[in-house]
Image (cartoon, helix red, strand yellow):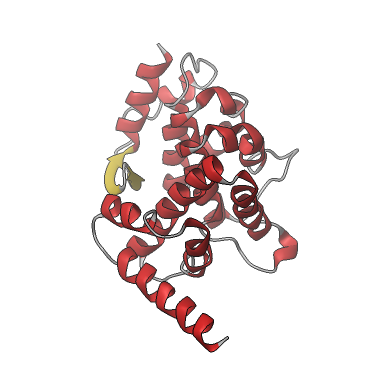
Amino acid sequence: MKDAKNSIRKLKKTVFHILCQNDCDRAVSQITSLPLRSVVNPLFSFFYHSDEIIRWHVITAMGAVAARLADEDIKAARVVMRRLIWNLNDESGGIGWGSPEALGEIMARSRRLAKEYAFLLVSYIDPNGNYIEYDMLQRGVLWGLGRLAHARPQLVRQAPPLLIPYLHSPDDILKGLATWIAGAFENNHELHPLIESFTADCAAIKLFANQKFIEISISQLAAEALAQSR
């Protein structure tokens, strides 16, 4: 028992050391070289870390691990999905930081899991679904939905009308993320007039994309979304 506990602690330290790297791609590559099922719990333990870079590395690594598990052991991958979903359930007693982002990252990487769970991520912005009211957590839901939409727009094609309240939001981050999501869909004409009004909006948001942070203006996101809709 003592040896098992020592082994778990050692693995957790190893995972943490890897996550502290600045190079996200390298960190993910090293995490996925470890026994996949064994690294799931250590990754979950760092979802609430105070360091923003570590949190995003955790989200990205969880996406890669669960997607590989889906190819090797679909039951184990579904357990990961259910744990993330549970974190977003009121009955969990927590807030669910990082869970919607991880769901989006996983499904962007795994078509099999996306086909099973994409509807659920959309439901978190649906007032008639499993709507999440907390503004700060909504940011995570929108990021996760955007990550999935840009990878597999056909699986979340019911999302665009649900973005309208966020496009009206006074919160630049929510508005920017919703605009980014809109850019994943071709012929998004229902959102066109609203997004067109953002082309002079110089407010900028920090977006984690392609494994790194970028600063991008809402006007640039709007221009990209409008180009996609033509």
Q: Is residue 133 visible?
A: no
Residue in the picture at 61% in, 64% down? 95
| Residue 3 at x, y percent in the picture | 50, 85
- Please give left or right for residue 80 compared with residue 55 in the image: right
- Please give left or right for residue 212 compared with residue 98 in the image: left
Q: In the picture, which quadrant includes the C terminus?
A: top left
Residue 179 against residue 33 in the figure, above or below = above
- In this view, which residue lies farthest toward the top? 230
Residue 186 against residue 72 in the figure, above or below = above
Name which quarter of the figure residue 1 lies in.
Answer: bottom right
Residue 155 against residue 90 in the figure, above or below = above
| Residue 196 at x, y percent in the picture | 40, 22
| Residue 63 at x, y percent in the picture | 46, 48
Residue in the picture at 60% in, 26% down? 161
From the viewer's side, name the closer residue of 80 and 215.
Answer: 80
Name which quarter of the figure residue 52 lies in.
Answer: bottom left
| Residue 99 at x, y percent in the picture | 55, 55
Residue in the picture at 35% in, 36% down? 218
